[in-house]
Image: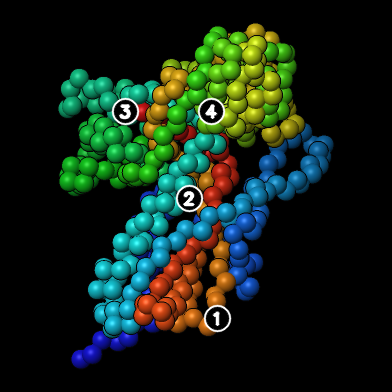
């Protein structure tokens, strides 16, 4: 019985299925498909707005305190066009779908999915919560592999705590993505937590975790590293009562740098719960209640060792009754000590992530379908749009084919994520 000729729609659907199955980090984040571009087709550089949840405070007493609804959104630029370009012949369209998928589509989709995940995990530079010890893999340090120590699981437990303190929903949408060394270290240390022998056996067979400590765990080789800048010196706050998305610091060695993504905290500047504006209660050594700030752009100290208007996140906003956007319990004072938490200067460390689904978003849009080609098709699945176009090269008697996904990443709510350093 002859094979059915593969159609553009069949190929596109199969390619999208493989891509979706290969994605690790993407599966755990908010995915938005922009239908506004579905008719004419989007182009690289197009901007869409991702709406953020509104924030309100709770009044006490019978008197009304009407609050304005201030809708906010995060602009997301469709600035990435992920694609793989291949040649296949008309004869190969007569293969069974399984054979065509294995020979041609699977290798191509593996490359695209890896790149999309890698760029998504680079969003760690926007996350200011962090647990773990730079240079020490999560779960390392047990003297006896059969004994579960608090130290072994502390990074994962503390990551969950940080999400709780920042009012992340306790639902089925919390995940941890670990790099290979972190997974190897933590998977062995957590086996003693479970009574389910089948789950323990699965961990031993695959070397990965399923669901534990309130998270779904996954392994991803695309976890990014942070490289710390050349910062040096004894750094303190320069000026009293600073607020907003910048801060001035002094005490750096002249002309040393802080890289984007590095974090620091300030003595006596503690975090507050975004829902009730109450002070964090964090007795554990990883936080002590101090809120971290992340550097949002690489900055160099001047010749006098000052970094004036260093860009940071979150914005420094004093918590108060009757407002919903406070981030700290006290404003920094002049001379307050600054402690850096990303690790040693000029050194790189992996940044695994614990996060709720709504911390990050991947948005995709339809690329325009060209006319006058051999074939073209476009499909959308689970918030991801893909296009395949095949033409004919009459000069070389070949059929070049391109597979494209147009999209972009954004950090929607960084407070719902926590870095796990190692």
Quarter of the image where the C terminus is located = top left
- In the rendered image, which quarter is residue 174 located in? top left
Q: Nearer the viewer, mark 3 or mark 1?
A: 1
Tell me: residue 134, above or below residue 198: above
Using the numbered discs, state the Cα–Cα distance from disc 2 to disc 3 in whole angstroms.
Answer: 24 Å
Q: Position of residue 169 (x, y in %)?
A: 51, 42
Query: Could one spot residue 344 in this view of the protein?
Result: yes
Query: Residue 288 versus residue 322: which sits nearer the camera?
Result: 288
Using the numbered discs, state the Cα–Cα distance from disc 1 to disc 4 in whole angstroms.
Answer: 46 Å
The label number, if any, that marks residue 259 in the structure image: 4
User: Mark 2 Cα within 10 Å, few/some/many (few <14, many 20+)?
Assistant: many
Please report whichever mark, 2 or 1, sits nearer to the chain's N-terminal start: 2
Q: Is 245 placed left or right of 28 in the picture?
A: right
Q: Which residue is mark 3?
A: 137
Q: Nearer the viewer, mark 2 or mark 3?
A: 3
User: Which structural element holds mark 3?
Assistant: loop
Q: Which residue is mark 1?
A: 371
User: Mark 3 Cα within 10 Å, few/some/many (few <14, many 20+)?
Assistant: many
Q: Which residue is mark 2?
A: 29
Residue at coordinates 69% horizontally, 24% vertically from top-left? 309
């Amino acid at each position: 019985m002859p094979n059915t000729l593969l159609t553009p729609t069949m190929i596109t659907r199969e390619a999208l299925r493989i891509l979706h199955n290969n994605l690790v980090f993407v599966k755990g984040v908010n995915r938005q498909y922009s239908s506004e571009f579905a008719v004419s087709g989007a182009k690289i550089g197009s901007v869409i707005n991702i709406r953020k949840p509104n924030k309100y405070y709770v009044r006490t007493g019978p008197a009304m305190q009407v609050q304005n609804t201030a809708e906010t959104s995060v602009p997301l630029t469709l600035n990435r066009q992920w694609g793989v370009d291949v040649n296949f012949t008309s004869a190969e369209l007569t293969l069974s779908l399984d054979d065509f998928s294995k020979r041609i589509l699977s290798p191509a989709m593996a490359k695209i999915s890896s790149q999309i995940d890698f760029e998504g995990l680079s969003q760690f530079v926007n996350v200011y919560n962090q647990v773990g010890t730079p240079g020490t893999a999560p779960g390392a340090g047990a003297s006896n592999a059969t004994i579960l120590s608090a130290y072994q699981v502390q990074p994962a437990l503390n990551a969950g705590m940080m999400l709780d303190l920042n009012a992340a929903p306790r639902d089925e949408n919390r995940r941890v993505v670990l790099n290979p060394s972190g997974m190897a270290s933590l998977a062995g240390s957590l086996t003693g937590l479970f009574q389910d022998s089948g789950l323990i056996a699965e961990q031993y067979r695959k070397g990965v975790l399923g669901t534990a400590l309130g998270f779904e765990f996954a392994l991803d080789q695309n976890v990014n590293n942070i490289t710390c800048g050349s910062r040096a010196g004894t750094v303190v706050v320069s000026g009293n009562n600073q607020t907003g998305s910048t801060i001035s610091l002094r005490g750096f060695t002249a002309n040393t740098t802080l890289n984007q993504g590095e974090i620091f905290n300030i003595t006596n500047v503690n975090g507050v719960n975004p829902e009730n504006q109450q002070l964090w209660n964090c007795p554990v050594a990883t936080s002590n209640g101090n809120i971290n700030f992340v550097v949002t752009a690489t900055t160099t100290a001047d010749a006098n060792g000052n970094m004036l208007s260093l860009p940071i996140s979150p914005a420094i906003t004093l918590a108060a009754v009757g407002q919903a956007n406070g981030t700290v319990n006290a404003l920094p004072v002049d001379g307050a000590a600054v402690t850096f938490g990303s690790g040693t200067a000029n050194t790189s460390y992996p940044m695994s992530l614990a996060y709720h689904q709504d911390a990050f978003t991947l948005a995709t849009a339809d690329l325009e379908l060209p006319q006058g080609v051999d074939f073209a098709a476009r499909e959308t699945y689970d918030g991801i749009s893909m296009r395949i176009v095949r033409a004919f090269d009459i000069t070389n008697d070949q059929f070049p084919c391109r597979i494209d996904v147009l999209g972009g990443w954004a950090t929607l709510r960084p407070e719902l994520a926590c870095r796990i350093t190692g």
